[in-house]
Image (tube, rainbow, N blue to C red):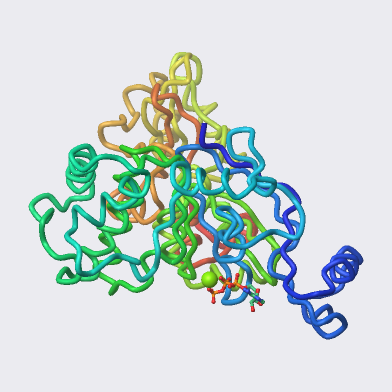
Amino acid sequence: MGDIHVKNLNVIFGKRKKEALRLLNQGESKASILEKTGCTVGVYDANLEIKQGEIFVVMGLSGSGKSTLLRCFNRLIDPTSGSIVLDDKDIVQCNEAELREIRRKKMTMVFQHFGLLPHRTVSSNVGFGLEIQGIDYETRRKKAYETIETVGLKGYEEQMTGQLSGGMQQRVGLARALATDPEVLLMDEAFSALDPLIRNNMQDELILLQEKVNKTILFITHDLDEALKLGDRIAIMKDGKIVQIDTPENILTNPADDYVKAFVENVDRGEIITAGSIMFENPASIRIDHDGPKVALRKMRKVGVTSLPVVDNKNNFLGFVKDEEMAYMEENNLDKISEYMHSKEEVRAVNPDTPVADLLPLFLDNIYNIAVIDNDKKLIGVVVHSSVIGEMIGTNREKVVQLKEEGGLAL
Ligand SMILES: Nc1ncnc2c1ncn2[C@@H]1O[C@H](COP(=O)(O)OP(=O)(O)OP(=O)(O)O)[C@@H](O)[C@H]1O
Ligand SMILES: [Mg+2]
């Protein structure tokens, strides 16, 4: 319930749609199609799946087709071809009566400028969708009060909506959309009219709210930070086409083309890139029950590092050893590595989801690389100093590896 499949969706505005579609399929650009046929390409060959519980963000420049795509979902715009399937029903094929049912019960929209009735109370606005469905006063009032509490407006139920601040009005808008218990929420630039602080709060609250309500959310925005923060996945549109659909992290690390790259260049990478994406996987390690200082030194020289992680025979992370201490052990015929190991109480281990920004401070008082461990404390990777700095300043990983190979970065 609540999954949406969009297949081969096209929206062409203008009279000569067939011809425009034919030219499109031959690879002609949006601009040349407009010139030759007078038709505007709204959306071209959109294919995507949105899963229930997911916040799916669409972003792109003005005119790239974001709103057109969203408006096809509730058929404010009729697609030229293609399908949008929600719970085994193709919305594109629905008749008027079916559409009305879908709009009332399954899919609601939250508007940028709230779209509320200012002279009605908050509870009356929130209960509006239920009123339209013919639900009795007591029932809808009860539901309205519950939903108002969910969006954090308890106490404001009987206030006039027009007297509330913008942020509060958008909460009312959200509550109104949720009151009919729809499967799908459509949000077109829903937070764009709010000032930055309030907008930030609303984003945080939408994330919390989504944990409770678990809807299918299609969220449109111009704003990359908003997209990265809210999106479980992000689709980037250009000239009506979806050029990339990916997780926020992949959008940043592997932009599909220069257009996407241009979008992501000015982001605070440290908050988005995680330890898991910059670690060296399956790193060389020392087995505590098996390896002595000689082996440790040889491995370090081979990999070109000055410290290595130590694990037990089940690959549980125990700590790090350093080259100078291993050399000292070797000289003095000592062989119990555990005596010269810096245990995990002294050194750092993080999980793969840790943002890079949180790793930097760990390096300040820690001369070792950082171990990346999974929930069972098994060693899965090592993050080296230089990769973290590389990510923070935007140098790509190949460059860091290259520098390392050339001996230009001390590990
Ligand atoms: N009703 C319409 N008739 C003709 N052309 C339209 C119509 N609606 C949208 N378009 C065109 O379709 C293209 C996509 O417009 P759309 O509004 O979907 O862009 P958008 O990405 O939502 O932009 P914005 O960020 O400015 O809201 C644009 O070229 C626009 O001019
Ligand atoms: Mg728009």
Residue 16 appears in view:
yes
Task: Report the front residue among 89 and 42.
Answer: 89
Q: Is residue 294 left or right of residue 142?
A: right
Q: Residue at x 33, y 39 (%)?
A: 348
Q: Residue 197, how many percent across, how many down?
A: 24, 69
Q: Is residue 235 above or below residue 16?
A: above
Direction left: furthest residue: 155
Task: Report the front residue among 276 and 74.
Answer: 74
Q: Residue at x 40, y 56 (%)?
A: 229
Q: Residue at x 15, y 53 (%)?
A: 153
Q: Residue 135, how many percent across, how many down?
A: 30, 40
Q: Is residue 277 left or right of residue 372?
A: right
Task: Report the front residue among 383 and 366.
Answer: 383
Q: Is residue 294 above or below residue 352?
A: above
Q: Residue 43, how many percent across, how many down?
A: 70, 64
Dividing the picture into quarters, in which one does residue 321 lie? top left
Residue 400 appears in view:
no
Q: Residue 221, how many percent across, how many down?
A: 48, 66
Q: Is residue 144 left or right of residue 92?
A: left
Marks counted in the figure total 0
